[in-house]
Amino acid sequence: MLNEIITEQRVYLACGFTDMRKSIDTLAALVQESFQLDVFSPCLFVFCNRQRDKLKILQWQHNGFWLHYRRLEQGRFQWPQASRDRTVVISRRELNW
């Protein structure tokens, strides 16, 4: 199902780490206020925790939000460090890696 959701969408990675206790509403506010992006656009907004073993993906679809969660049992995600650019745009293929 995730592959269907990811097609034809921009993917924004939130640089640095994000508190994984944040809810849909708080992540949506972060996208709009800090990143200056439209949370209702057909994009995926991806957040990673400090240990880089958990991801949350926020997505708007039709009339509601999806919140996808991924936890690694081993290994770590490669993740961009916090910088002046608050987001990095990647391809759908890179997200699947």
Image (spheres, rainbow, N blue to C red):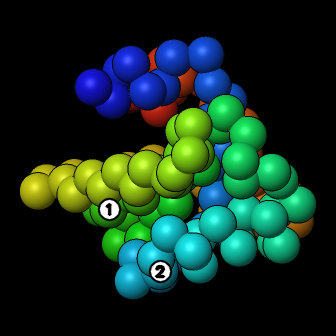
Other residues around mark 1 within 10 Å, as few (<14) / some (14–19) / many (≥20): some
**Foreground: disc 2 or disc 1:** 2
Residue at x 50%, y 53% (from the top left corner) = 65
Residue at x 51%, y 17% (from the top left corner) = 7
Q: Secondary structure at mark 1?
A: strand
Q: Residue 56 sits in which quadrant?
A: bottom left
Q: Residue 52 sits in which quadrant?
A: bottom left
Residue at x 83%, y 72% (from the top left corner) = 33
User: Which residue position is annotated with label 1?
Assistant: 54
Question: Which amino acid, by three-letter code, is at mark 2?
Answer: Lys
Q: Position of residue 94 (x, y in %)?
A: 50, 26
Question: Which amino acid, by three-letter code, is at mark 1?
Answer: Lys
Give me the C-alpha separation between circle 2 and circle 1: 13 Å
Q: Is residue 66 left or right of residue 15?
A: left
Check the picture and name the quadrant holding the C terminus: top left
Q: Position of residue 79 (x, y in %)?
A: 52, 53
Q: Is residue 60 left or right of residue 15?
A: left
The mark that comes first in sequence, 2 or 1, is 2
User: Which residue position is annotated with label 2?
Assistant: 22
Residue 76 appears in view: no
Q: Nearer the viewer, residue 62 or 30?
A: 62
Q: Is residue 84 left or right of residue 30?
A: right
Q: Position of residue 69 (x, y in %)?
A: 31, 56
Mark drawn on residue 93: none
| Above-or-below relation of 31 to 4 | below
- Please say if the residues under marks 2 and 1 sit with CB atoms less than 8 Å apart: no
